[in-house]
Image (cartoon, rainbow, N blue to C red):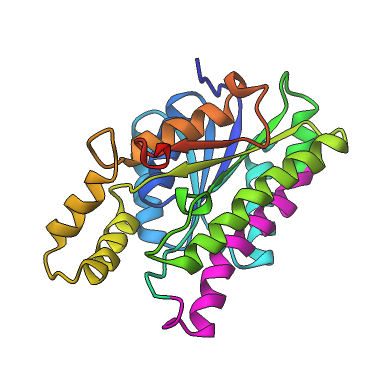
C-alpha cells in the first residue's frame, strides 16, 4: 500500500520539517526524490541521510518565488530521472503578524512564497506531469500543502489564512481544469493542524502575544488543548498523508482537501 515504486517526485521546501519527512518516506516507498529548497546545508544533509538509508535522492536549490528557478528544477528532475510523476508544493512561511500591523512588504513576501510558489510550481511542472501521466496506470499527482487556516478563520495570522485559502481553492480549480482537458493529473491538498516543526514554534510565539504570556509552554499547552486527539501533530503525520495522496491508492481522489488536524476543525 502507498507504494511509489518507479515514480519521480519533486518536493519544494524539502530541507526540513514536513518536506524533509515527506522526502524520506517517498524514498522509502520506492520513489526517486528531488529535494528543492533555498536552505542548502540542511537540504544536502537531508539528502545525504536518504541516500545513506538506501534511497534515491538529489538536492537542488529552488527558490519557489522564481520562475527561472522552477524551470531549472523541473528540467533537472526530468533530465536526471527521465520523468516527473509527483509534485509536492510544500514550501510555505508564516508571518505571525496582526493584519493591522503587517506592512505591504510583509504581505508581498507571504504571497510570493505561499501562493506564487504554488502557481509557478504547478504551471511549470504541468507539461512533465502530463507526459508522465500518459505512461502511468493512474496518472500523475500534485499535492499542495495548505492548512486548517485555509478552511476556517485564523486569529493568529489572518494574512496567512488568506494565502492558504487561496491554495485550497487553487487546488480544486486546477483539479477541475486538468480533468476537463483530459490530463491525467490529480490535484489534492493537505490541511495540517498545529505541527511540531519550526513553523509550529512560530505559531506558539504568536499565541503567546494573544494570551499575554511570556511562557511559551503555556502557549504550547493552549495549542495542544485545541486538538481533541490530545497531542500536537508531527511532520510524520502530515508526510504520511502526502505520500498517500501521491500514490495510486488515491487514484480516485482529485480536488480533495485532506484534513489532518487531530480533530481541531471537527467542532
From what the image shows, is residue 5 above or below residue 41? above
Residue at screen point 60% across, 67% down: 65
Asked whether the viewer can see residue 62, the reply is no
From what the image shows, is residue 221 above or below residue 180? below
Q: Quadrant of residue 32?
A: top right
Q: Quadrant of residue 18?
A: top left
Q: 200 or 214: nearer the eye?
A: 214
From what the image shows, is residue 187 above or below residue 151? above
Q: Position of residue 212 (x, y in %)?
A: 18, 71
| In the image: residue 109, left or right of residue 209 | right
Q: Position of residue 172 (x, y in %)?
A: 69, 43
Residue at screen point 11% across, 65% down: 215
Considering every residue shown, the one lying at the far top of the view is: 1
Magenta stretch bounds: 99-127
Dominant secondary structure, magenta: helix
Q: Position of residue 56 (x, y in %)?
A: 48, 33
Q: How many marks?
A: 0
Residue at screen point 79% across, 35% down: 131
| In the image: residue 94, left or right of residue 11 | left
Is-magenta flag for residue 109? yes
Is-magenta flag for residue 249? no
Considering every residue shown, the one lying at the far right of the view is: 181
Q: Quadrant of the C terminus?
A: top left
Q: Position of residue 42 (x, y in %)?
A: 35, 55
Asked whether the viewer can see residue 166, the reply is yes
Considering every residue shown, the one lying at the far front of the view is: 267
Amino acid at each position: 500500500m502507498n507504494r511509489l515504486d518507479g515514480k519521480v517526485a519533486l518536493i519544494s521546501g524539502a530541507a526540513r520539517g514536513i518536506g524533509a519527512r515527506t522526502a524520506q518516506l517517498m524514498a522509502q516507498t520506492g520513489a526517486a526524490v528531488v529535494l528543492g529548497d533555498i536552505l542548502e546545508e540542511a537540504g544536502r544533509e537531508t539528502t545525504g541521510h536518504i541516500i545513506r538509508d538506501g534511497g534515491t535522492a538529489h538536492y537542488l536549490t529552488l527558490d519557489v518565488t522564481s520562475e527561472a528557478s522552477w524551470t531549472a528544477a523541473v528540467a533537472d528532475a526530468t533530465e536526471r530521472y527521465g520523468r516527473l510523476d509527483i509534485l509536492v508544493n510544500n514550501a510555505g512561511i508564516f508571518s505571525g503578524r496582526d493584519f493591522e500591523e503587517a506592512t505591504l512588504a510583509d504581505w508581498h513576501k507571504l504571497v510570493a512564497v505561499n501562493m506564487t510558489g504554488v502557481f509557478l510550481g504547478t504551471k511549470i511542472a504541468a507539461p512533465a506531469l502530463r507526459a508522465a501521466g500518459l505512461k502511468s496506470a493512474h496518472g500523475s499527482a500534485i499535492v499542495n500543502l495548505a492548512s486548517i487556516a485555509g478552511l476556517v478563520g485564523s486569529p493568529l495570522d489572518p494574512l496567512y489564512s488568506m494565502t492558504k485559502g487561496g491554495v485550497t481553492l487553487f487546488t480544486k480549480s486546477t483539479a477541475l481544469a486538468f480533468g476537463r482537458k483530459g490530463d491525467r493529473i490529480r490535484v489534492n491538498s493537505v490541511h495540517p493542524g498545529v505541527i511540531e516543526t519550526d513553523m509550529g514554534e512560530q505559531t506558539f510565539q504568536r499565541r503567546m502575544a494573544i494570551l499575554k504570556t511570556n511562557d511559551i509552554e503555556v502557549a504550547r499547552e493552549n495549542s495542544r488543548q485545541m486538538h481533541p486527539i490530545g497531542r500536537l501533530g508531527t511532520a510524520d503525520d502530515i508526510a504520511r498523508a502526502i505520500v498517500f495522496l501521491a500514490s495510486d491508492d488515491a487514484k480516485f481522489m482529485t480536488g480533495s482537501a485532506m484534513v489532518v488536524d487531530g480533530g481541531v476543525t471537527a467542532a
